[in-house]
């Protein structure tokens, strides 16, 4: 999405359409599958609900879902006003998502507390 700001005209519109398709297929399906497997993991081992690392992980997942929803709204808004695309905004979102994902994975594998 950061490249959308560098394009103009038809190329910019095509990038927005492609980003929307990728988001709808990859991000939404990936989020749904991840949440489903998370629920199955908790059902398989309910004792994990007493662990502090899981509570922090779930908070990070909720934050990731909030950013996911914000990105979806932003992509939809770009369809109406493509000139509002800002590289810095999408770079920031990308960085936040990367940090959250890294934090979630660290909590899963290290189980620090």
Image (cartoon, grey):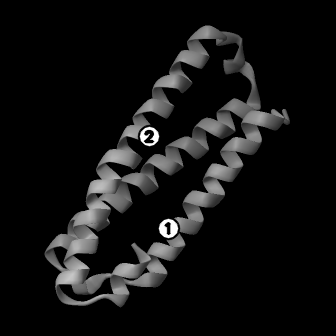
Instruction: Report the residue at 62% width, 50% height from top.
Output: 101
- Position of residue 78 measured from the top left corner of the image (x, y, whole percent): 23, 73
Mark 1 vs 2: CB contact within 8 A? no
Instruction: Report the residue at 27% width, 64% height from top.
Output: 18
Q: For the N terminus, which image quadrant?
A: bottom left
Residue situated in front as seen by the camera: 79 or 11? 11
Return the mark for residue 30: 2
Q: For the C terminus, which image quadrant?
A: top right
Marks 1 and 2 sit apart, C-alpha to C-alpha, by: 17 Å
- Position of residue 7 measured from the top left corner of the image (x, y, whole percent): 31, 88
Q: Looking at the rendering, which quadrant does residue 89 occupy? A: bottom left
Q: Specify whether 83 is left or right of 94.
A: left
Q: Specify whether 78 is left or right of 52.
A: left
- Position of residue 61 measured from the top left corner of the image (x, y, whole percent): 55, 42
Q: Specify whether 71 is left or right of 39.
A: left
The residue tagged 1 is 93
Q: Looking at the rendering, which quadrant does residue 83 occupy? A: bottom left
Instruction: Report the residue at 32% width, 81% height from top.
Output: 85
Please rate how many residues cluster around mark 1, counting C-alpha atoms within 10 Å: few if below 14, some from 14 to 19, many from 20: some
Q: Looking at the rendering, which quadrant does residue 4 occupy? A: bottom left
Tell which residue pokes out farthest to the left in this image. Answer: 80
- Position of residue 10 measured from the top left corner of the image (x, y, whole percent): 17, 83
Residue situated in front as seen by the camera: 18 or 32? 18
Upstream in sequence: badge 1 or badge 2: 2
Instruction: Report the residue at 22% width, 73% height from top.
Output: 14
Q: What element carries label 2?
A: helix
Residue situated in front as seen by the camera: 82 or 16? 16
Up/down of 61 relative to 36, above or below: below
Which numbered mark, 1 or 2, is in the foreground of this view?
2
Q: Specify whether 5 is left or right of 83.
A: right
């Amino acid at each position: 999405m950061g490249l959308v700001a560098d394009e103009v005209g038809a190329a910019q519109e095509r990038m927005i359409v492609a980003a929307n398709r990728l988001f709808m297929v990859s991000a939404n399906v990936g989020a749904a599958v991840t949440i489903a497997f998370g629920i199955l993991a908790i059902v398989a081992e309910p004792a994990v609900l007493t662990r502090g690392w899981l509570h922090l992980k779930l908070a990070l997942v909720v934050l990731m879902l909030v950013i996911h929803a914000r990105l979806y709204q932003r992509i939809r808004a770009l369809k109406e006003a493509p000139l509002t695309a800002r590289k810095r905004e999408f770079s920031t979102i990308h960085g936040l998502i990367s940090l959250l994902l890294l934090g979630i994975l660290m909590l899963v594998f290290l189980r620090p507390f």
